[in-house]
Image (tube, helix red, strand yellow):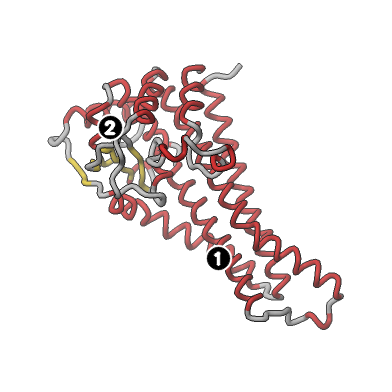
Amino acid sequence: MTNLYNYSAVNKRKTWLLMTGFFIFIIVAAYFISLATDMPEILLIAVILSVVMSWTSYWYSDKMVLAVAGAKEIKKIDSPELYRLVENLCISAGLPVPKIYIINDPAPNAFATGRNPKHAAIAFTSGILGKLEKVELEGVVAHELSHIGNRDILIATIATTLLGVIVLLSDLFWRWSLFGGHSRDNDRKDGRITLAISLLALLFALLAPLFAQLLQLAISRKREFAADADAALLTRYPEGLARALEKISNDTAMPTRTINKATAHMYIISPLKAKEQKASWFNKLWQTHPPVGERIARLRGL
């Protein structure tokens, strides 16, 4: 029977399967492109690039996201009630208390960032603090602490980085083709084999960025479901988070310009929700968050 524990565990397993598929996809794409260009070093470069870019973004992405969002750090003296709420949930979750930031924005929303639980931060918009009841805000905080505890920031960073590597590989192949590139060993290879390899490389270069982005978005959606279930476990009150999601999704306040497509995937509900709710089923494949109605229904069902 489905319960909060096995539901969260299933979503985590699916996420790591998707991540494994992502790495395999990069290696396969790099392999075919290296065969077509007769440049075996491309495979090695792809692996090194994945590791280096993941490491760099892991260490510095949180500072950039907070700066882009216009978030300002506050201390306990500035908002003692909010701090106590976060501290109490951190004790229950066995996590260190993260830094707390406020974004001057009337639209209710929140996100977590940081490379690990010891270097984490939660940012709240001024709108969410003014519009949610305590039990609803508890659900939101628990959701963000679940992201921190589950190392979702690391997973999201790696997924975004791997997408960047795929795009770079694709671009490299197109540039090589555009400038009349050909295999250094073409004369010694069977023409049909060369053609087959070139067609496969062309197919990967064309479709790889598309599939890579779909994988990244699938990972993001799975993490949201898992964080919802973990938040319900932490607070023992799924209805609090369900009501919070309902209020945030129905709020009509327009987010400020500090929230954009580059950072929208980090928030508890996409700030671009007005556009996404009207999207067709095909466009919903490209959304960073699962449908809010489905998240609420699952919380209440659990």
Give the camera-side residue of 168 and 31.
168
The answer to whether 269 appears left or right of 8 in the picture is left
The answer to whether 176 appears left or right of 125 in the picture is right
For marks 1 and 2, the one nearer the N-term is 2
Which label sits on residue 168? 1
Q: Which residue is at 58% across, 47% downward?
A: 214
Q: Which residue is at 29% across, 41% downward?
A: 123
The alpha-carbon separation of the residues under discs 1 and 2 comes to 38 Å
Q: Which residue is at 69% across, 74% downward?
A: 37
Which label sits on residue 8? none
Give the camera-side residue of 101 and 199.
199
The N terminus - image quarter: top right
The answer to whether 148 appears left or right of 211 in the picture is left
Determine the secondary structure under disc 2.
helix
Q: Give the total number of marks visible in the rendering.
A: 2
Where in the figure is residue 263, as x and y percent of width and height?
39, 48
Where in the figure is residue 31, as x and y percent of width and height?
69, 64
Q: 10 Å neighbourhood of mark 2: few (<14), some, or many (≥20)?
A: many
> Which quadrant holds residue 248?
top left
Give amino acid for label 1. Leu
Q: 10 Å neighbourhood of mark 1: few (<14), some, or many (≥20)?
A: some
Which label sits on residue 128? 2
Give amino acid for label 2. Ile
Q: Which residue is at 51% across, 26% downward?
A: 294
The answer to whether 52 appears left or right of 210 in the picture is left
Determine the secondary structure under disc 1.
helix
Where in the figure is residue 288, as x and y percent of width and height?
48, 42
Q: Is residue 6 above or below residue 110?
A: above
Q: Is residue 59 above or below residue 296?
A: below
